Image: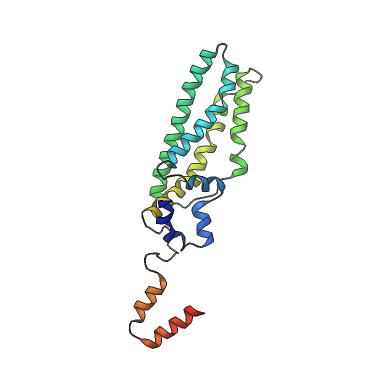
Amino acid sequence: MERHVRWSGVLSELDSEHEDLLFGTSLSRRFSQLPLWLSHPANIGMFYGFLISLALIFPYILRYDSLNESFSNWLLFSALFMSACLILGFSSLILVSFSNRMPMTPPRIVLYPMPFLGIALLGLDYSNILDIPSGISLFVLLLPGPAYVHLSWAPRWRLLCMIDEGINPFESVKSYINPPEELADSLAGEDTELLEVVDAFESE
């Protein structure tokens, strides 16, 4: 609540286009409601790795004969997978901080089916139905989360941090620190005729 009060001055100055660029679609809007430390791109990437790891429990049970062996190997894979997603999230934020790139819409039609495809390929490989190189399955599993973080969330998180610090991230938007009416009054000075024109324009 306190954060939204701090942001209200900036958000009130944004048009619908810049607001959509700032908050994105439903997924990014949900992430933007989290505290900034929790929605860090590295944390979002690691969260994606955690979700994928949960979905791989059953394929790992199929691959090994004993449950102990299955869960020990699954835990090792999950730790490595989540660490890779976390590191890629940090890397994306570093690159964005240098390039100052604005958020981009990821190709959803390509990225969204990929986790399901990767899990299916890995399941077929582990169940010995098909001989599929594990590198292909892991690449298909890994790509969507880091790609979304790099293209969409890391630049968006940078903009949210700027707003939280009181900085307007959009050059085309007038500064919210000095409202336009105060600027007009200061420029007009004691010129009563110019002030009357300004007042008439504002009333219209």
Name the residue: 46% across, 59% down. Answer: 11
- Specify whether residue 100 is in view: no
Residue at the spot 42% in from the left edge and 85% down from the top edge: 196
**Residue that appears at 41% across and 44% down:** 93
Position of residue 113 relative to residue 158, above or below, is above
Q: Nearer the viewer, residue 12 or 84?
A: 12
Q: Position of residue 19 (x, y in %)?
A: 51, 57
At which x and y percent is residue 124? Answer: 64, 22
- Res. 138 image quadrant: top right
Question: Would you say 165 lies left or right of 41 here?
Answer: left
The residue most toward the front is: 1
What is the residue that sits farthest to the top in this orientation? Answer: 65
In the image, residue 21 sits, relative to residue 115, either above or below, namely below
Residue 59 appears in the rendering: yes
Q: Residue furthest left?
A: 190
Q: Quadrant of residue 126?
A: top right
Q: Position of residue 193 (x, y in %)?
A: 40, 88
21 left or right of 166 in image: right
Q: Position of residue 168 (x, y in %)?
A: 40, 59
Give the residue furthest to the bottom: 193
Q: Nearer the viewer, residue 65 or 130?
A: 65
What residue appears at the point 41 percent right and 72 percent down from the top-left corner? 180
Question: Which colour style is shown?
Answer: rainbow
User: What is the tally of numbered marks visible in this picture?
Assistant: 0
